[in-house]
Image: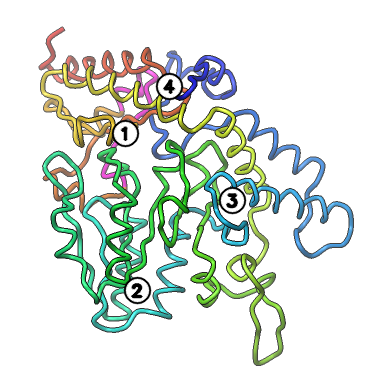
Amino acid sequence: MAKAFDVEAVRADFPVLARQVNGQPLAFLDSAASSQKPLQVITAISDYYQHHHANVHRGIYRLSEEATAAFECARERVARFIHAPSRKEVIFTRNATESINLVAQSWGRANLRPGDEILLTEMEHHANLVPWQLIAQEKDVRLRFIPITEDGRLDLSELDALLNPRTRMLAFTQASNVLGTLTPVRQIVDAAHAVGALALVDGAQGIPHLPVDVQALGCDFYAFSSHKMCGPTGVGVLWGQRELLEAMPPFMGGGDMIRRVSLEHSEWAALPAKFEAGTPAIAEAVGLGAAVDYLSDLGMEAVRAHEKTLTAYALERLVEVPGLTVYGPSDVDVRGGVTSFTLKEAHAHDIATILDSEGVAVRAGHHCAMPLHKKMGLSATARASFYIYNTPQEIDRLIEAIYKVKHIFGRGHL
């Protein structure tokens, strides 16, 4: 059993949680969009800028050597965090979106042929949909989709029928940012490999909340963002199997990704530099390294256990509200800390606005998953999402604020 952490001690590490919003203590329930940052991350970034900043990989003076060491140390910490066989397989990008675009454009352009197929799912974030649409249009490739069941899980009874020798890539989310659904990654990856396809996992909603071992998952690519896992914005990661990355052409050209350049021809640098053209997000990578340390100290098993407890309590309280519908699986063993819902009396945007007046921050809209909302017959949902610093008391405040929405719209039972 995972050792629990002290939630109040964790909350003390996040300065923003001391804020008041509209005269109320902040209850931040939008970590699925972007998590808050602990002092340890803020301090690491500040220390870098105050004492060590210079460009990396290019200078032979002390500051540049220190910046390079800090940048590459962050890469090493990320590699350990995801159990990558080599730090050279860890590519720094701007975010998970850029990581997926890198694979779609670099691997896709080199390997896809007319008539090939890419298999996705109906619950994908636009970041794992639009890049494949673009390359499919360019290469005359067909997109196919694993459907979802009524309770928001992947309908894997269709998987064998959808996979075939023409399938070249199966790209899917580890955790839905709308439904909270956790997908059986290894099962899906193995099915893709059985027909000779590669598998890419969008881990943006997975790695902040779950222990991740890319070797155990068996996938070929794993993409994620720093800003959802206590790190800064502006940096993300693509992990890929080394032999695949070595065979792929560069995604962008420029400085630092070359071995030799003439006026007519260039030769590429070795991994990971080949995919990191230009000055990278140095301070942001340092911040990501600090975030990885922070989460490692808490223990990802403990993080998952905490969120399961919160999610179970939230589902219990939400279903008590008349006229409220929660979407996604009811079983917290296959669900992350995301609860999207609608209320009979009010639009999602009205819900979020009134909740904000009570100091409760939630998301409203289609959450960059328009096709999924269309599948569910919805234009928008309100979404409360939980993380390491949230408490049951904040869920109680969410419920109280929802009843205020019902009251304002004249159909409450107060």
Numbered circle sitting on residue 135: 2
Residue designated by label 4:
390
In the displayed orientation, state which residue is furthest to the top. Answer: 414
Mark 2 vs 4, N-terminal side: 2
Reading the chain from its start, which is encountered first: label 1 or label 2? Answer: 2
Task: Look at discs 4 and 3 and give the one toward the viewer.
Answer: 3
Where disc 1 sits, the SS reads strand
Q: Please check the rendered image and state whether residue 77 is part of the magenta-colored stretch, yes or no.
A: no
Label pair 2/3, CB-CB below 8 angstroms? no
Q: Is residue 8 above or below residue 333?
A: above
For the C terminus, the image quarter is top left
* Disc on the earlier residue, 1 or 4: 1
Q: Residue at x 49, y 53 (%)?
A: 95
Q: CA distance from mark 3 to mark 1?
A: 27 Å
Region of the chain picked out in magenta, as a range: 353-367
Residue at image location 45% in from the left, 55% down from the top:
223
Q: Pick whichever, 128 or 208, lies toward us.
A: 208
Q: CA distance from mark 4 to mark 3?
A: 28 Å
Q: Residues within 10 Å of mark 2 (few under 14, many from 20)?
A: some
Residue labelled with disc 3 = 79
Residue 74 relative to residue 178: left or right: right
Q: Which mark is residue 338?
A: 1
